[in-house]
Image (cartoon, rainbow, N blue to C red):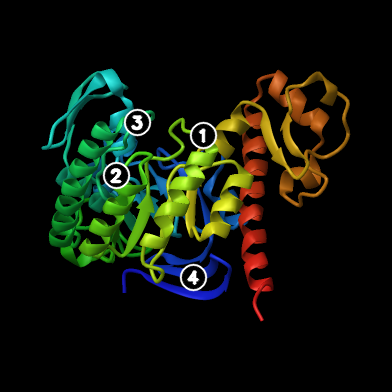
């Protein structure tokens, strides 16, 4: 089975469940660290495992440009390429190509764009996005969608939604027809070297049980969100995401759109809100009934010296921490807080040492993961 979703407990709208995927089980509600270019910036995979990261997010656009999806396919798929044995979700590339602004042109066929790396010309269609994600071999792929900017008027949101729904149908049809075309992998440590020529006897097929999620769009208009959700549910995806949020709108509006959309999605299937948010926000969304969330914030903030703690946000650059012997967060049990002081972390940041990003990122990821663990425990504790 490619995906199963078993709900164990509920508390109000929140639910604690197990999402079973080809590369392992994921306890939800879950936060998924973003591994944009087959890496969570500054953190080795072994440490991610030690932190008990259950699932990562990979970026289709970036991996398509570098090193290339066909290269990753030849090397055995994204899991083998990055030496990660747990589940991976890949986005469709839609958000990245639409964010290119002056570098892209959108038509009903797809999106023509120029690479931000070298200016070369490329084209993403729903079918091509599926081909790239199939080559990567992720556990969960995302339908190709148009992420509506904020603010957008009703006519713009309407036209964008219509295109996204057409692209969702094309994505699903192509994925259903081609998902068996997955990467090959060498059989174990005794197999041929990766660079040598393979024969059918030297390799086995990676599971072709990749699942495809649909993405609800519609801007900030509840009636368009309803139509999007209802049309996607008719297409019968294994799971559903709510996209087009955290694009500059007020937090209250984000909550409003999530609250309006969640009841329209099948309760027996996983529900994913894309690209959110601060620790208190992801906890709030989980209590609303969201199962999966991702965000670059914990890693990006860490590289700028911003730490998330039980006492609030801590800017480690501040001079007040120059001789502070306390851990970053006295209530945190992560490896960084058990060993290092604020004074030392400030020194690393001011000295522009590479270790600064490593330690700050480990702490922030641990804090996000602990936030979700507390929500899961809260849900269980609320049950008879």
Whether 100 is drawn above or below 191: the answer is above
Judging depth in this view, the residue of 366 and 237 nearest the camera is 237
**Residue behind mark 1:** 250
Q: Is 254 situated left or right of 173 in this image?
A: right
Foreground label between 3 and 1: 1
Q: Can residue 297 be seen by looking at this rendering?
A: yes
Q: Earlier in the sequence, mark 2 or mark 3?
A: 2
* Mark 1 Cα shell of 10 Å, populated few (<14), some (14-19), many (≥20): few
In the rendered image, the quadrant that contains the N terminus is bottom left
Q: Secondary structure at mark 4?
A: strand
The CA span between labels 4 and 2 is: 24 Å
Q: Residue 3: x and y, percent?
A: 35, 69
Q: Earlier in the sequence, mark 4 or mark 1?
A: 4
The CA span between labels 1 and 2 is: 25 Å
The CA span between labels 3 and 1 is: 13 Å
The answer to which image quadrant residue 146 occupies is top left
**Residue behind mark 3:** 149
Find out whether the residues at labels 4 and 1 contact each other: C-beta distance under 8 Å: no
Q: Earlier in the sequence, mark 4 or mark 2?
A: 4
Whether 138 is drawn above or below 118: the answer is below
**Residue behind mark 2:** 92
Q: Secondary structure at mark 3?
A: loop
Judging depth in this view, the residue of 253 and 135 nearest the camera is 253
The residue lying at 42 percent from left, 53 percent from top is 260
Find out whether the residues at labels 1 and 2 contact each other: C-beta distance under 8 Å: no
Q: Secondary structure at mark 2?
A: loop
* Mark 2 Cα shell of 10 Å, populated few (<14), some (14-19), many (≥20): many
The residue lying at 24 percent from left, 42 percent from top is 161
Whether 294 is drawn above or below 20: the answer is above
Q: Earlier in the sequence, mark 4 or mark 3?
A: 4
């Amino acid at each position: 089975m490619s995906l199963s979703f078993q709900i164990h407990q509920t508390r109000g709208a929140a639910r604690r469940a197990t999402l079973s995927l080809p590369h392992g089980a994921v306890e939800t509600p879950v936060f998924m660290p973003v591994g944009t270019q087959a890496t969570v910036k500054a953190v080795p995979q072994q440490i991610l495992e030690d932190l008990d990261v259950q699932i990562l997010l990979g970026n289709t656009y970036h991996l398509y440009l570098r090193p290339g999806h066909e290269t990753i396919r030849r090397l055995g798929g994204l899991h083998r390429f990055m030496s990660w044995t747990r589940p991976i979700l890949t986005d469709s590339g839609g958000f990245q190509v639409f964010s290119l602004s002056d570098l892209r042109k959108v038509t009903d066929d797809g999106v023509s764009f120029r690479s931000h790396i070298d200016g070369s010309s490329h084209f993403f269609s729903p079918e091509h996005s599926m081909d790239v994600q199939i080559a990567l071999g992720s556990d969960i792929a995302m339908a190709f969608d148009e992420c509506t900017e904020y603010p957008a008027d009703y006519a713009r949101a309407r036209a964008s939604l219509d295109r996204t729904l057409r692209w969702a149908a094309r994505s699903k049809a192509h994925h259903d027809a081609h998902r068996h075309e997955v990467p090959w992998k060498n059989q174990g440590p005794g197999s041929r070297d990766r660079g040598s020529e393979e024969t059918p006897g030297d390799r086995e097929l990676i599971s072709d049980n990749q699942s495809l999620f649909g993405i609800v769009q519609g801007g900030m208009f509840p009636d368009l969100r309803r139509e999007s959700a209802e049309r996607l549910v008719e297409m019968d995806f294994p799971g559903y995401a709510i996209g087009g949020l955290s694009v500059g709108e007020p937090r209250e509006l984000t909550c409003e759109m999530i609250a309006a959309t969640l009841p329209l999605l099948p309760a027996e299937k996983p529900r994913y809100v894309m690209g959110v948010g601060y620790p208190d926000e992801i906890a709030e969304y989980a209590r609303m009934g969201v199962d999966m969330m991702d965000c670059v914030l914990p890693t990006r903030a860490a590289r700028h010296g911003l730490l998330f703690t039980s006492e609030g946000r801590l800017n480690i650059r501040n001079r007040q921490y120059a001789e502070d012997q306390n851990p970053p967060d006295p209530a945190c049990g992560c490896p960084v807080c058990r060993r290092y002081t604020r004074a030392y972390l400030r020194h690393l940041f001011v000295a522009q040492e590479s270790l600064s990003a490593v330690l700050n990122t480990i702490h922030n990821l641990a804090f996000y993961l602990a936030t979700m663990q507390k929500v899961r425990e809260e849900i269980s504790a609320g049950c008879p």
